[in-house]
Image (spheres, rainbow, N blue to C red):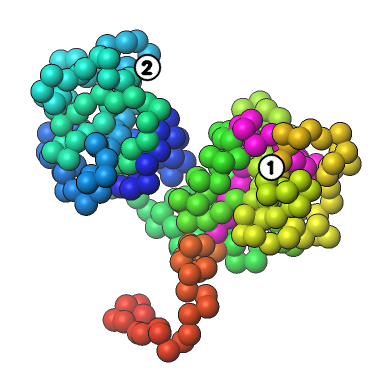
Amino acid sequence: MHPEAVDWHQARMRCEAESTELLVPSNLDEADSIPLLVASILTKYEGVYVGIHDLYSERTFVTIIGSYLQDSILELLWEQKQPLHSGGRCVAARRNGRLFVHPCSEALPFLCKIKAANVMYHPDCDTYDARWKLGPNKTCYITHVEPQTWYEAYSTCHFAGGHLAILDTREEAEYIRDVFKQVDQHKTPGDFAFLGFSDLFQRYHYRTVLGDRLVEKQVDWDFKCPGNFTTSDQRCGGYKRSGLLATGHCNIPSMFFCEKPAKGTFRIRKTLRNLPKSLYTKNQFDNI
């Protein structure tokens, strides 16, 4: 359950970035579980996005895996007088589990789904997502080869418990460079990937997504950056296959790298790091 509201396309992309998919109820029992998941958040919103739309052909509703709703058990889930064809092209579920159409561009919370058989714990990175790989400095990384804008990439990393990768050491830069070189250029064209820095606050004042100044001594810049031969739109930082820092257009999708601590998530580590030890209490699971 994602309580943060985004548009339908962002919701689909966010679920896929987590190795899940927007929820499509497999049966009526699963549909009946929706109210239990969403009851606490639907005081603010009309519903939650699910993986159904008619974007391919108007009035022909299909799931994100290509199944037609017509003559399926899912047709029983429509709210009264729905589908209202002037209401939108994407589908959401009410608090009672009933389906209704909604404008795809309007933000709603959303539900992601993964089969229990596909859930496996990976201790190296303290995660259930096998795409996280242990790298240097007790840090795990994930390579997203499907392009997103810098802003979308930032959000994807954040909600996965990490942040856009920041190259603090030369060892880290060499690791990302080697991973980048393994990405198939035929599947992901271009030689640029987003990282976690930008000069969005002030031109040429490069800051990481954590608010720190860029450690430029650890990684060399491409000769065109910063400033030389770049345009005013190239405000978001990245990395080239050659192993050099560069800037790119924030709104032009590119592949990107996320990072997180090998244990826990960035958000948890950041929050707890400065708490006094007196606030920590042992629990029954500490020694397991």
In the image, residue 235 lies at what x, y percent? 71, 41
N-terminal of the pair, mark 1 or mark 2, is 2
The Cα–Cα distance between marks 1 and 2, rounded to whole angstroms, is 31 Å
Residue 236 image label: 1
Do we see residue 31 in this rendering? no
Residue that badge 2 annotates? 55
Residue in the picture at 48% in, 62% down: 267
Q: Pointer 1: residues within 10 angstroms few (<14), some, or many (20+)?
A: many
Q: Which residues are magenta?
A: 240-260
Using the image, determine if residue 281 lies above or below residue 186. below
| Amino acid type, residue under disc 2 in the picture | Leu
Which quadrant does the C terminus fall into? Answer: bottom left
Q: Pointer 2: residues within 10 angstroms few (<14), some, or many (20+)?
A: some
Question: Circle 1 sits in a helix, a strand or a loop, which is it?
Answer: strand
Q: Is residue 256 magenta?
A: yes
In the image, residue 157 lies at what x, y percent? 52, 49
**Foreground pick, 258 / 202:** 202
Do we see residue 186 in this rendering? yes
Residue 35 image label: none
In the image, residue 163 lies at what x, y percent? 56, 54
| In this picture, residue 75 sits left or right of residue 200 | left
Residue in the picture at 37% in, 53% down: 120
